[in-house]
Structures are given as C-alpha cells and as structure tokens.
Amino acid sequence: MRKIRPLIAPSILSADFTKLGEELERVKEADLIHFDVMDGHFVPNISYGLPVAEAVKRVTDIPLDVHLMVEQPERFLHSFAELKPAYITVHYEAVTHLQRTLAQIRELGVGAGLALNPHTPLTGLKYILSDLDLILIMTVNPGYGGQRFIPAMLDKIRDCRALTNGYPIKIQVDGGVSTANARQLVDAGVDILVAGSAIFSSPDPGAYMRQMRAEGD
C-alpha cells in the first residue's frame, strides 16, 4: 500500500458561479484550484477563460492548476502564465509540436503538464518524460462534470507510474474522483486528486478534502 498524502485540487467547473468568491472560501484548504478551460471544439462544451481565472486569482492565494482543453493551446500560454499558476496542462491530442509546447511552458516559469484522454495510449510519453512536470490521466471523457470514473483507468495509472519511475513527475487524475476511490487511486500511483462535484456538493468541503487526503495514510 502506497503511503503518501495526495494533493487535492477542487475543480471550480462544479462551483456555483453566482457566488464564486464564497465557493473559493469553502475550499480554502485545497492545495490547488483546478481550472478547466473548454473551447467547444476540442471538447463538446464551453466553460470559461482568462477573465474568470483573473477573478479567481484576485480572491485566493491557492495556486491555479490550469487545464487547457482547447485546440491550439499554445495560443493561450503567455496569458495564463502571467497568473503564475503551478501548472499549465495541455492535451496530447491537441498539440502538433508537443516537445516545443512543453518547453515553452517551462520557459514561462510554469510547471509543464500533459493530459491524456482515456483512449490515448502512454507509448509516446517515453520520448518527452524529461520535459514533463505533471501527467494528467483523464478518468472520464473530458468536457462535462459529474461523470462516472472509468475503472480501466486504474491499470493505465499503474502503467504510467511505472513509466515515470526515476523522473520527478506528478501524476494527476480528473474525472469521477471521490472518497470512494481515492485510496485505490493513490495506491495505483496518483499524487494529485482533482474532484469537482464530490467536493462542491459536500456540506463541508474542508472535511471532505481532509478525508480524501487521509486515504493516503
């Protein structure tokens, strides 16, 4: 059994945007704020963009974790990097010159993250491991919150952990994450748990996040 205390990153996609400041206060114990940017092209939904990220930055000191679910994400790197997020994550499926894009993120002083959809194999990662700070394994098909976790992704997480041994790369998961599967995910090799509806629908998000962290003990 793997013993780590995972980092918790609430996805504000599931927050109540009529009172976003209050929602961020409810998750003030978070390690990161996961910020999903959707363009309606790469994924079948549109979320929010830079103005909302700037508003979030004004009301919380928790580092942003920017997840660009967009086509040609390199267009937005400089703008989001100005907010000094912990990570900017782009999708394997959305980038043509991947090594160049990851290098650019690092040159902007931000951790370089790479997301993979559930069907995307890990094979191409071995050529860019030295360019990565974070790998995000999507455990649902991206684009909508509240989906069920895909169980087959546990094997993918284990394979990813084996592939990254010897590299200082964090493994993150997003999709259907809750206290019900946090222990399995940490055991499989996850360092950062992204959860949206599970946290924001809880009457006490702080207690819920503490429970998620405790699953790593």
Image (cartoon, rainbow, N blue to C red):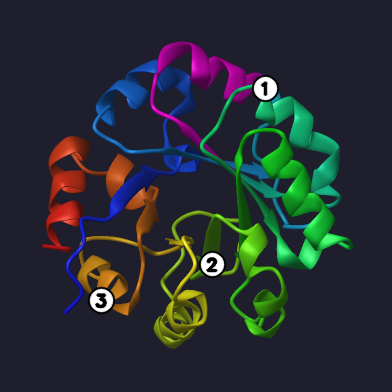
Classify the position of the N terminus by image quarter.
bottom left
Residue at (55, 16) in percent of width and height? 55
Q: Residues within 10 Å of mark 3 (few under 14, many from 20)?
A: some
Q: Which residues are magenta?
A: 51-66
- Disc number for residue 187: 3
- Disc number for residue 82: 1
Q: Determine contact: label 2, label 3, CB under 8 Å.
A: no
- Check the image and name the residue furthest to the top: 58
Which quadrant would residue 93 be assigned to in this image? Answer: bottom right
Q: Identify residue type, mark 2.
A: Met
Q: Identify residue type, mark 1.
A: Glu
Residue 57 in magenta stretch: yes
Q: Identify residue type, mark 3.
A: Asp
Q: Residues within 10 Å of mark 1 (few under 14, many from 20)?
A: few
Residue at (86, 50) in percent of width and height? 72
Counting from the top left corner in percent of width and height, residue 50 is at 69, 25
